[in-house]
Image (cartoon, rainbow, N blue to C red):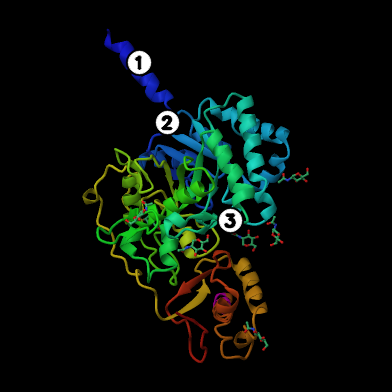
Amino acid sequence: MDLLPLLCLFLFFSISSGEISSQAGINYGQLGDNLPSPKKSVKLIQSLGAKRVKIYDANPHILNALEHTNLQVSIMLPNQLITNVSTSQKLADSWVESNVLPFYANTKIRYLLVGNEVISNPPNETWFNIVPAMKKIKTALKTHGLNKIKVGTSMAMDVLESSFPPSNGTFRSDIAVPIVKPMLQFLSRTKSFYFLDVYPYFAWASDPKNINLDYALFESPTVKYTDPVSNLTYTNLFDQMVDSVVFAMKRLGFADVRIWIAETGWPNAGDIDQIGANIYNAATYNRNVIRKLTAKPTIGTPARPGWVLPSFIFALYNENLKPGPGTERHFGLLYPNGSNIYGIDLTGKTPDSEFEPLPKPTNNEPYKGKIWCVAARGANMSALGSALSYACSQGNKTCDPIQPGKQCFKPNSLYWHASYAFSSYWSQLKATAGATCYFNGLATQTAKDPSFGHCKFPSVTL
Ligand SMILES: *[C@@H]1O[C@H](CO)[C@@H](O)[C@H](O)[C@H]1NC(C)=O
Ligand SMILES: *[C@@H]1O[C@H](CO)[C@@H](O)[C@H](O)[C@H]1NC(C)=O
Ligand SMILES: *[C@@H]1O[C@H](CO)[C@@H](O)[C@H](O)[C@H]1NC(C)=O
Ligand SMILES: *[C@@H]1O[C@H](CO)[C@@H](O)[C@H](O)[C@H]1NC(C)=O
Ligand SMILES: *[C@@H]1O[C@H](CO)[C@@H](O)[C@H](O)[C@H]1NC(C)=O
Ligand SMILES: *[C@@H]1O[C@H](CO)[C@@H](O)[C@H](O)[C@H]1NC(C)=O
Ligand SMILES: *[C@@H]1O[C@H](CO)[C@@H](O)[C@H](O)[C@H]1NC(C)=O
């Protein structure tokens, strides 16, 4: 027998068996006003060694920029459209016709996520519409013969009511039966994936006393945890979190639905009151998780040894318009100007010794001391004026000292008055109302006391 037909036969079988590759991808978020063009971004994505890319919409400029590349693409139906799509096959069809069909021939669209962490966000009415919307989108794809596209939705860890020990993993009781069960049914029937957003960073940062940092960074050969019920032994926090989802699915009768790591990563910087967000930890976590996920033979997790865990690392860029604490704006592998924040290789093939040395971490212990909240340099002056008025309208006598003739009136500048108002607002309302030092990016934390002369700035003490 000649070799060629045999080889072809082999190729045919290996492709048709539905094996999924373990190559890592990247999340290409765009919540920045200073990011490179889609064309430049695609070049950067390729230079990082990514084989896949996930976007949070179906931006036609990005889908065009991805034409004729070998990158597999995951697109997203935005959360706001889910409710309408869930009740209208016609709307699902037309969304697919305008957002998928025109690009499919030249751009390798392979995944379509119906919403982003929908169940973690209000309104709860939308939660019940996810699965109906997924079904209608799947039907629309079928109608157009777009059968290579898997349909899913991304889920954060907070859909679990218990994740410890991993064997106790349980979906929240308000969603388990009405939403997650039919979702797993759909994912199982269509051979799709449970798209999981998993951040050991947040789990560790919320309890750094009891969770070992090296365990969260895949760096500890000695710290191990054995689940008393499953008897499985864990050597890192990531596996523990993923397996809690595996056990939660099993509890609902779906032991075989594959998991896709839709987001994971570690922040390279954050606010002063945020622990462990630094370049050293970010590089360590991301390099280690990529090596684990792309290893051959595949590693899987203790509950699923050897299983492929395809992945998208979060994220391509630091995104300056993301709201929330500072870490939110610092998950990038790249600065907005396109240069690397630290050496990284999404193929997982570069050993640590080939990367430049990393800056030593300085915030791996909780910050202890006072923090003030001041106006950010370069803040938009008219926006700063509005933020000042807002801060002064909250709390009690928040801005009395900056009134004319009072001890903090001088220097009489908007920057100075806003800084006082932000510090005063934050120190009064952080503990009781969960106030943040953010103001749409107009405010920033400082450990340097801005007080001047007789003017004493209120502070937050950690
Ligand atoms: C959903 O449909 C309603 C009724 O047709 C419409 O008023 C609304 O604008 C739609 N929502 C979105 C986000 O398109
Ligand atoms: C949705 O949230 C509202 C307000 O919290 C609550 O009253 C209602 O019971 C929730 N509905 C469902 C179906 O969970
Ligand atoms: C297991 O999960 C349940 C909630 O689903 C929780 O009440 C219980 O405390 C957990 N068990 C352990 C040992 O943590
Ligand atoms: C775990 O180990 C204990 C003690 O050796 C044993 O009784 C139990 O059956 C084991 N559980 C599983 C799930 O293997
Ligand atoms: C890109 O931005 C970073 C952070 O602001 C800066 O350190 C770096 O020098 C810049 N690189 C280039 C090539 O401009
Ligand atoms: C400054 O903020 C105002 C509103 O607060 C906005 O209308 C304006 O476009 C902003 N200017 C710049 C340069 O961003
Ligand atoms: C403002 O004063 C009122 C009455 O003394 C008090 O109940 C409230 O908690 C105060 N608010 C803050 C933010 O301190």
| Relative height, residue 145 to residue 36 (above, below) | above
Tell me the residue that label 3 is attached to: 120
**Mark closer to the observer (1, 2):** 1
Amino acid, disc 3: Ser
Does label 1 point to a residue whose CB lies under 8 Å from ligand 4? no
Outermost residue toward the top in this view: 1
Q: Nearer the viewer, residue 372 or 33?
A: 372
Quadrant position of ligand 6: bottom right
In the image, is 240 to the left or to the right of 181?
A: left
Q: Nearer the viewer, residue 250 or 82?
A: 250
Q: Nearer the viewer, residue 417 or 393?
A: 393
Tell me the residue that label 2 is attached to: 70
Magenta residues, as a range?
415-419
Amino acid, disc 1: Cys
Is label 1 in a helix, a strand or a loop? Answer: helix
What is the x, y in percent for residue 96?
63, 32
Classified by dominant secondary structure, the portion drawn in magenta counts as: helix
Tell me the residue that label 1 is attached to: 8
The answer to whether residue 413 shows anywhere in this view is no
The residue at the point 46 percent across, 48 percent down is 246
Mark 1–mark 3 distance (CA, rounded to whole Å): 47 Å
In which quadrant of the rendered view does residue 416 lie? bottom right
